[in-house]
Image (cartoon, rainbow, N blue to C red):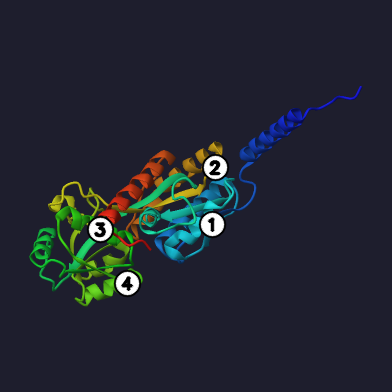
Amino acid sequence: MTKKYTRRAVVGGLAGLSLVGNARAEADWPTRTVTIIHGFPAGGPSDIISRLLADGLSRALGQAVIVESRPGASGTVAAALVARGVPDGYTLSVIPSGHASAAATFASLPYRSVDDFTTISLASEYPYVMATHMDSGIKSVAELIAAAKKRPNSLLYGTPGVGSGPQLAIELFALETKIKVTHVPYRGSAPAVMELLAGRLDFMMDPPATMMEFIGNGKLRVLAVSSAKPYFALPSAPTIAESGVPGFDVTGWQGLIAPAGLPEPILKRLNAEAVRILKDPATVERMHTFGNEASPSTPAEFKKRLIDDIAKWTAVAEQIHFEKI
């Protein structure tokens, strides 16, 4: 006797086979090379952190994990590639805190900054260092604020570009202290620091990696760090919050993500391995060499941080009437 199959039964059967196949693929993962994409040139913090994670993951997972640099448009080119990726655990990315500031400063992006990604773990954090050149006469945050109030818009600050994290951090500082200063954007941090050293800028706030050499050789004066807690590499430097701006707390970061919809078993495995790698003393020591602190987290903690930073920088951009890029 020939059985008759309804359309519903056939569809249901196929769906069941698909679920079984997906479950098997998740259980077997990984069976091939995993790629970590980032959006910046080789040798920078995002690249180094990607390679630290790739090396540790490769040993833990028993598969090759390679790093691919796709620079362009402040990291948004790489982020767009990941957003379009398949959430199967074979495409990962290390994103910077600029991912959050881009959401506040770009007129449009080819992805949704939160919903198109799975957050796996925060990887590292660092404060911005507020510094001035040695001949400026400004020796503290209080003196900087006083000079800016005495001569509105006359103090010049440099940044690595329009809409960058340092610009938003200084604009937040200006809003909270009720001062007016003038922004001078450059194509990257290096030329801005050179202008600061030459005395053509009055102050900057930038990641430690670009400042530490010149602080160490006495060519730049540290005024404060932007984090709420003291910074390991400059233990004697006050925080901005301690220097008369209560509650000021800004840090940059890098974090590990995947496309949205990453299966829970793969997410749990990746988070566990990332946290283990980031807690390894060798990883902590390597990050210290370029001024970062290893900062592992849960997926939920990293997602909250991303959402909170987007909200913070969106509010700043609105208050200063930022013209979107």
Query: Which residue corresponds to mark 2?
Result: 262
- What amino acid type is highlighted by mark number 4? Tyr
Query: Which residue corresponds to mark 4?
Result: 186
Question: Which of 108 and 168 lies nearest the eye of the viewer?
Answer: 108
Contact, CB < 8 Å: mark 2 with mark 4? no
Cα–Cα gap, marks 2 and 4: 38 Å
Question: Which of 277 and 211 lies nearest the eye of the viewer?
Answer: 211
Residue placed at 32% from the left, 68% from the top? 189
Q: Earlier in the sequence, mark 1 or mark 2?
A: 1
Query: In terms of secondary structure, where does tag 2 sit?
Result: loop
Characterize the local packing of mark 2: few (<14), some (14-19) or many (20 or more) Cα atoms within 10 angstroms. Answer: many
Characterize the local packing of mark 4: few (<14), some (14-19) or many (20 or more) Cα atoms within 10 angstroms. Answer: some
Image position of 116 (left or right of 150): right
Residue 272 visible in this rendered orientation of the protein: yes
Residue 280 visible in this rendered orientation of the protein: no
Residue placed at 32% from the left, 52% from the top? 314
Residue placed at 29% from the left, 50% from the top? 315
Q: Earlier in the sequence, mark 2 or mark 3?
A: 2
- What amino acid type is highlighted by mark number 3? Ile
Question: In the rendering, at what x and y percent does residue 140 appear?
Answer: 12, 61
Q: Earlier in the sequence, mark 3 or mark 4?
A: 4
**Above or below 135: residue 288:** above
Query: Which residue corresponds to mark 1?
Result: 81
Cα–Cα gap, marks 1 and 3: 31 Å
Characterize the local packing of mark 1: few (<14), some (14-19) or many (20 or more) Cα atoms within 10 angstroms. Answer: some
Query: In terms of secondary structure, where does tag 4 sit?
Result: loop
Query: In terms of secondary structure, where does tag 1 sit?
Result: helix
Question: In the rendering, at what x and y percent does residue 285 appear?
Answer: 36, 54
Cα–Cα gap, marks 1 and 2: 15 Å
User: What number is the disc on residue 320?
Assistant: 3
